[in-house]
C-alpha cells in the first residue's frame, strides 16, 4: 500500500493534470467494455505501449497455486500462455520486493533473464516494471514495458504506469473471478459428463482413460492412475495410467502406498512422498518421473467392498487439500459401479475370446448342435476336415444333412448321445475323400442337467497328420507345419529380414574335462531343454546346435511384427533362467555355467541347403555372421547380451541398454554400433545401475570427442559404483592406449577388431 500512497501524494503535489485525468477515464471506459480477460489484457497492453511510447508491454498475472507469473500472447486464432517463476528476472524481482524498477541497460542488470530474448530473437534494451495491484492494494501481478522509443524511462513514467494499471485493476480482477468461476463450472461439467458416460461405457480401457484424465484436470495435478484389484492374483494393476505408455503395472495388493490404502481403506494425503517409508521409489526410477506429493483413496463398490485405488500425483503449486480429498472421494463413489460393470464385461469378453481363440487354434474340428439338432458353431479346423468353404455353409444345417450317406452312423450316435463317447480311428467321408479320425461325442447340458444340444470333436489322424507328427520330432513344429503346407516354396529358398541369436557356453572345454563324457551330455541336455523352451515360447526357430552353442532365428519361416523384441526377450529370459539353473546346480554340488549371446537383425536367406544325400533347412547371410561376431565379442566387453545397432533400431518396446562401442568387426569395412542389454541384472549383479550407466554414457560421449582424460574420469566414476563393470575397465585401458598413441586423422570413435 506504501507505493500507492506515494503516488497519491505526488499526484496531489503536482495537481493532477487534466490530460492524465482524461487518460485514466479512457482506461476505465475501455476496460469496462471488454468481455474477457484476454481482450482486457490486450487492450491494457495497447494503452500502456502507446501512452509510454515503448516498443512492447506485457501484463504478468500471478498464479498463486503454482508460484508462477503468466502472460497471454495471441497466436493466430488462439492464446498461448508464457509462464515464469515469480522470483525470476526483473518481473520476479519486482513482484517479490513489491517495488518498481527502471532499468536503462537490461544486459548490465544481473536480475535480467536473457533466455527469453534468446528464444524469441527480440533485443531488450530498457525496462520499466511495476507491481500490479487490485483495488484493495493486494498484488496480483506485474506490468512490464520494454524499450522506450525516445529517451529513457523516468519516475514519472513509473507513476503513470502504476496509475494506469490501478485504474484497470477492477476490470482485470472481475475477469479473473469470472475465469475461475468458468473453470470450476467446466470441471464440474466434465465431472458430470464422465459420470453420465459410465452407465453406457462397457469397455474398461476407454472408461479408465476418461476417469484418469478427468481426475488429473479436476485436481490440477500432473498425473493420475487408477489401480484395479485382480482377485485371481491378489494384485493391483493398471492398464491405463498417465506416463506409462503401453505398459501395464502389476504389484501385490499389499505393497506401497496404493497397497496400504487398498488393505486399510484409509485416505492418504502425502505432501512429501520420499519422506514416507511406505513409498516405493522403484517406479520413479523406471519411468524417470519424480513424485513429490500424492493423494491416494480407495475405490469401493455399492456393497462397501474395496475394488481398487485411485492415485493422483504432484498437485501444481503445493500439497493436496482437504477439498481435493472430498472431491476425489465423491468422484470415486460415483464411478465405482461403472468400473465394476466394465471389469465384469471385460472378464466375460476375455473368456469368450479365450474360448473362441482356443477353438480357432485347435487342429481338431469342433462342431456343436443345438437342442433342435441344428449346427450352432463350427471351428476352422472342422470346416477344413469336412471340406466346407465357410461357416455360413454349415451353421443352421440339420444334423441329418451334415452326417449323411457313408457318415449316417455318426448322426445316429450323436443324436442319442447321453454321456461322453469316444471312437478311435474311425473312417469318415467328406467330398468323396476318406479320412481317418478319432471322434469324441459329448452331450451339452445346463446347470440343471437339461439337454442344450451336443458336440462332436474330430481329430484327423490321416497320413498327413502322421507324417507331421514324425517330422516334429526332428525339427521345430511350426516349421514342420509350413513344410507340409508349403513344401517346395519354403525348401526352394526365401530372402527375408530376420533376427539371428547366437548363444555359446563359456569355458566349455574346462567343464568337459571336469565332468567327463556322461556328465557333459547330462549338462547339455539339462541346459538345452531350458533354453529351447524359452526360444520356442517366443516363436523362435532353433536352427542348429553347434556343440555347446545354439543358432536361433526369429522371422523365418514364420514372421512376426516384433521378431527383434522376441529375440531380445528370449536372451533376457535365458540369462535369468540360467541363474536359476546355476542355483540348482550349486545346491547339488555342481559347478555353475555361463554363456554369452549375440543378436543381429538383417537380410537372411533361408532354405534347404546341402547335398542330395543330406540337407538341412537353415539360414545364411551377413546377418548371420554379424550375430556370431557379436556373441564372440561378449568376452571382450565382459557382457552377456550384445546386439547390433540394426536390432536396437528395430525394437518396439523399451529395454535397459547401453551403447558400448562402434566397431569394424573382422571381415567387414563398415562400422557397426554395438549395444549391451542389461535388463536381466539385479542390484547384486549390477549395483547402482542408473548412476553407473549415467557415468558410462558420459564417458562414451567424451571418448567420441577424443577427450581421453575426461573420459577416464567418467569411466572410473562408473567403476566406483560398480567395480565389476568390465566394459568400463576396458575403456579406461583403451583411453590410455589412445592417449599414448593418438589415432591418425579425424577421430570418429570407431574401433577396429583384428580378431573374430
Image (cartoon, rainbow, N blue to C red):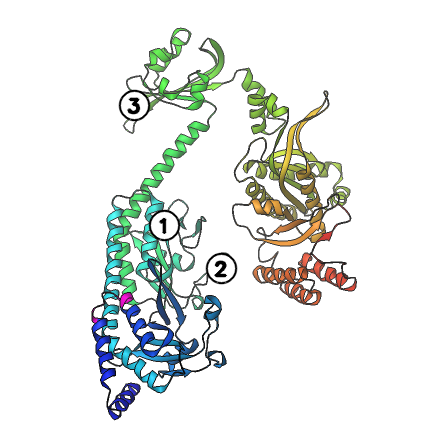
Point out the residue furthest to the front here. 150
Closest to the observer: 287 or 276? 287
**91 within the magenta span:** no
Q: Which residue is mark 2?
A: 288
Number of other residues with Cα within 10 Å of mark 3, as a class: few under 14, some 14 to 19, many 20 or more: some
For discs 2 and 3, the disc positioned in front in the rendered view: 2
Which badge, 1 or 3, is on the more N-terminal residue? 1
Residue 9 vs 596, above or below: the answer is below
What is the distance, in whole Å, between disc 2 and disc 3 at their CAs? 56 Å
Relative image position of residue 229 (x, y in whole percent): 37, 49
Relative image position of residue 383 (x, y in whole percent): 42, 19
Relative image position of residue 51 (x, y in whole percent): 31, 77
What is the distance, in whole Å, between disc 2 and disc 1 at their CAs? 23 Å
Q: Which residue is mark 1?
A: 228
Point out the residue furthest to the bottom here. 13
Q: Which secondary structure lies at badge 3?
A: strand
Closest to the observer: 649 or 264? 649
Q: Which secondary structure lies at badge 2?
A: loop
Relative image position of residue 15 (x, y in whole percent): 24, 90
Q: Which residue is mark 3?
A: 452
Say whether marks 2 and 1 touch (CB < 8 Å). no
Q: Position of 505 compared to 558: left or right?
A: right
* Residue pictured at 71% horizontal, 62% vertical: 732
Residue 550 vs 254, above or below: the answer is above
Residue 237 vs 404, above or below: the answer is below
Amino acid at each position: 500500500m506504501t507505493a500507492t500512497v506515494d503516488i497519491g501524494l505526488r499526484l496531489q503535489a503536482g495537481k493532477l493534470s487534466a490530460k492524465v485525468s482524461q487518460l485514466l477515464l479512457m482506461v476505465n471506459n475501455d476496460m469496462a467494455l471488454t468481455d474477457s480477460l484476454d481482450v482486457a489484457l490486450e487492450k491494457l497492453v495497447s494503452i500502456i505501449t502507446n501512452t509510454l511510447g515503448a516498443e512492447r508491454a506485457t501484463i504478468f498475472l500471478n498464479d498463486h497455486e503454482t508460484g508462477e507469473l503468466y502472460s497471454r500472447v495471441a497466436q493466430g486464432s488462439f492464446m498461448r500462455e508464457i509462464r515464469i517463476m515469480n522470483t525470476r528476472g526483473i518481473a520476479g524481482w519486482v513482484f517479490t520486493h513489491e517495488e518498481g524498477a527502471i532499468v536503462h541497460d537490461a544486459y548490465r542488470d544481473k536480475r535480467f533473464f536473457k533466455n527469453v530474448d534468446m528464444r524469441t530473437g527480440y533485443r531488450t534494451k530498457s525496462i520499466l516494471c511495476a507491481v500490479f495491484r487490485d483495488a484493495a492494494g493486494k498484488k496480483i501481478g506485474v506490468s512490464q514495458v520494454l524499450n522506450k522509443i525516445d529517451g529513457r524511462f523516468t519516475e514519472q513514467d513509473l507513476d503513470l504506469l502504476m496509475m494506469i494499471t490501478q485504474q484497470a485493476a477492477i476490470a482485470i480482477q472481475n475477469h479473473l473471478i469470472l475465469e475461475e468461476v468458468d473453470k470450476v463450472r467446466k470441471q464440474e461439467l466434465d465431472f458430470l459428463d464422465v459420470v453420465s458416460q459410465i452407465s453406457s461405457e462397457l469397455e474398461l480401457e476407454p472408461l479408465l482413460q476418461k476417469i484418469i484424465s478427468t481426475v488429473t484436470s479436476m485436481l490440477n495435478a500432473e498425473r493420475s492412475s487408477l489401480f484395479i484389484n485382480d482377485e485371481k492374483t491378489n494384485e493391483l494393476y493398471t492398464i491405463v495410467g498417465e506416463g506409462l505408455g503401453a505398459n501395464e503395472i502389476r504389484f501385490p495388493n499389499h505393497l506401497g502406498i496404493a497397497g496400504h490404502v487398498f488393505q486399510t481403506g484409509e485416505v492418504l494425503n502425502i505432501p512429501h512422498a520420499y519422506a514416507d517409508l511406505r513409498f516405493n521409489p522403484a517406479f520413479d526410477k523406471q519411468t524417470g518421473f519424480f513424485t513429490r506429493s500424492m493423494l491416494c483413496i480407495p475405490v469401493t463398490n455399492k456393497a462397501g467392498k474395496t475394488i481398487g485405488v485411485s492415485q493422483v500425483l504432484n498437485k501444481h503449486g503445493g500439497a493436496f487439500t482437504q477439498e481435493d480429498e472430498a472431491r476425489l472421494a465423491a468422484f470415486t463413489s460415483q464411478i465405482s459401479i461403472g468400473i465394476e460393470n466394465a471389469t465384469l464385461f471385460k472378464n466375460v469378453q476375455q473368456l469368450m475370446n479365450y474360448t473362441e481363440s482356443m477353438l480357432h487354434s485347435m487342429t481338431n474340428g469342433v462342431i456343436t448342435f443345438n437342442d433342435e439338432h441344428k449346427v450352432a458353431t463350427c471351428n476352422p479346423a472342422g470346416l477344413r476336415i469336412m471340406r466346407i468353404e465357410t461357416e455360413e455353409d454349415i451353421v443352421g444345417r440339420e444334423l441329418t444333412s451334415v452326417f449323411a450317406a457313408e457318415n449316417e452312423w455318426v448322426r445316429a450316435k450323436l443324436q442319442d448321445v447321453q454321456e461322453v463317447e469316444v471312437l478311435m480311428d474311425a473312417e469318415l467321408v467328406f467330398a468323396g475323400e476318406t479320412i481317418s479320425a478319432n471322434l469324441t461325442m459329448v452331450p451339452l447340458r445346463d446347470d440343471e442337467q437339461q439337454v442344450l444340444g451336443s458336440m462332436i470333436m474330430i481329430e484327423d489322424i490321416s497320413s498327413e497328420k502322421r507324417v507331421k507328427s514324425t517330422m516334429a520330432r526332428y525339427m521345430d513344429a511350426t516349421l514342420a507345419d509350413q513344410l507340409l503346407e508349403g513344401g517346395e516354396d519354403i525348401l526352394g529358398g526365401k530372402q527375408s529380414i530376420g533376427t539371428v541369436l547366437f548363444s555359446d557356453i563359456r569355458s566349455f572345454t574346462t567343464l568337459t574335462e571336469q565332468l567327463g563324457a556322461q556328465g557333459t551330455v547330462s549338462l547339455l541336455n539339462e541346459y538345452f531343454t531350458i533354453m529351447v523352451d524359452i526360444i520356442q515360447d517366443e516363436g523362435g526357430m532353433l536352427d542348429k546346435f553347434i556343440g555347446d552353442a545354439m543358432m536361433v532365428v526369429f522371422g523365418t519361416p514364420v514372421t512376426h511384427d516384433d521378431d527383434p523384441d522376441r529375440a531380445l526377450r528370449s536372451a533376457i529370459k535365458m540369462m535369468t533362467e540360467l541363474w536359476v539353473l546355476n542355483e540348482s546346480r550349486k545346491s547339488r554340488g555342481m559347478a555353475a555355467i555361463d554363456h554369452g549371446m549375440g543378436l543381429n537383425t538383417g537380410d537372411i536367406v533361408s532354405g534347404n541347403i546341402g547335398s542330395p544325400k543330406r540337407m538341412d533347412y537353415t539360414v545364411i547371410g551377413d546377418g548371420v555372421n554379424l550375430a556370431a561376431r557379436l556373441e564372440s565379442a561378449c568376452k571382450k566387453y565382459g557382457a552377456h547380451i550384445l546386439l547390433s545397432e540394426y536390432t536396437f533400431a528395430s525394437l518396439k518396446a523399451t529395454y535397459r541398454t547401453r551403447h558400448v562401442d562402434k566397431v569394424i568387426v573382422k571381415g567387414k569395412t563398415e562400422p557397426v554400433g554395438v549395444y549391451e542389454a542389461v535388463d536381466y541384472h539385479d542390484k547384486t549383479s549390477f549395483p547402482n545401475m542408473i548412476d553407473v550407466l549415467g557415468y558410462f554414457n558420459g564417458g562414451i560421449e567424451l571418448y567420441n570427442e577424443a577427450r581421453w582424460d575426461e573420459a577416464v574420469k567418467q569411466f572410473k566414476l562408473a567403476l566406483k559404483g560398480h567395480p565389476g563393470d568390465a566394459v568400463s575397465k576396458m575403456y579406461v585401458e583403451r583411453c590410455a592406449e589412445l592417449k599414448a598413441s593418438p589415432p591418425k586423422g579425424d577421430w570418429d570413435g570407431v574401433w577396429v577388431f583384428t580378431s573374430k
